[in-house]
Image (spheres, rainbow, N blue to C red):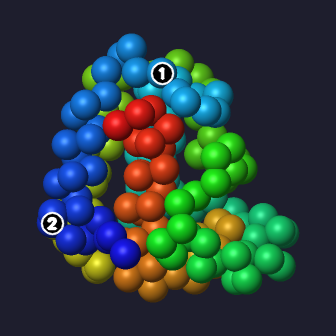
């Protein structure tokens, strides 16, 4: 499984982000491209411990059983629910969001597993750095596929 901690995998993600334009349209979902970039950036903040959304009751009860969905080889389903705290509905500047996400990913990748938070994921609960690395790659891949790159 791909991990954002592998240089080659991170580089491919960054190259795909560079293929996005302000005119990129989603194949599914409600977010526009700028909102998607902001959402992925906000998710990166969770992984790095900069943001700590509260755990939902469903996450507390069901998250540990669903946890393997985050870091297995099966693609994420379209239109999955998201963490309410990182659901982006306001308008965002494309270039700003694109650069913010790329900077966060480069920093995270370079710092390696020590960059991962020890706080629990809001739904899945406690994750190892390896699970974070795989899950972040999977999440980014999902949203980049959403926009056709």
Q: In this view, does 40 lie to the left or right of 14?
A: right
Name the residue at the top extreme. Answer: 23
Between 98 and 143, which is closer to the camera in this rendering?
Answer: 143
> Would you say the residues marked 2 and 1 are in contact, meaning their CB atoms lie under 8 Å apart?
no
Residue 11 numbered mark, or none = none
The answer, for residue 128, to whether it is visible in the render is yes
Q: In x, y percent, where is residue 120?
A: 58, 76
Quadrant containing the C terminus is top left
Callout 2: SS: helix
Q: In this view, does 133 lie to the left or right of 38?
A: left
Between 8 and 94, which is closer to the camera in this rendering?
Answer: 8
Q: Is residue 51 above or below residue 116?
A: above
Q: Give the quadrant of residue 79.
A: top right
Q: Is residue 25 left or right of residue 65?
A: left
The residue sitting at 73% across, 83% down in the picture is 65
Spatial CA distance of label 2 from label 1 is: 28 Å
The residue sitting at 41% across, 52% down in the picture is 141
The answer, for residue 117, to whether it is visible in the render is no
Figure label count: 2
Quadrant containing the N terminus is bottom left
Callout 1: SS: loop
The residue sitting at 58% across, 58% down in the picture is 76
Q: In x, y percent, where is residue 96?
A: 30, 27
Residue 25 numbered mark, or none = 1
Q: Is residue 57 above or below residue 96?
A: below
Q: How crowded is mark 1: few (under 14 residues within 10 Å), some or many (20 or more)?
A: some
Q: Earlier in the sequence, mark 2 or mark 1?
A: 2
Q: Mark 2 points at which residue?
A: 7
The residue sitting at 45% across, 32% down in the picture is 147
Q: In x, y percent, where is residue 40?
A: 45, 46
């Amino acid at each position: 499984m791909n991990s954002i901690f592998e240089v080659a995998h991170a580089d491919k993600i960054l190259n795909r982000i560079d293929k996005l334009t302000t005119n990129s349209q989603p194949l599914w979902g409600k977010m526009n491209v700028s909102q998607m970039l902001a959402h992925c950036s906000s998710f990166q903040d969770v992984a790095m411990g900069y943001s700590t959304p509260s755990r939902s009751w469903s996450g507390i009860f069901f998250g540990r059983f669903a946890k393997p969905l985050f870091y297995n080889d099966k693609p994420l389903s379209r239109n999955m629910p998201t963490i309410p705290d990182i659901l982006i509905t306001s308008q965002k500047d494309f270039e700003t969001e694109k650069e913010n996400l790329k900077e966060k990913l480069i920093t995270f990748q370079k710092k390696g597993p020590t960059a991962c938070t020890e706080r629990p994921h809001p739904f899945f609960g406690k994750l190892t750095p390896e699970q974070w690395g795989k899950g972040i790659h999977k999440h980014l891949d999902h949203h980049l596929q959403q926009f056709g790159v």
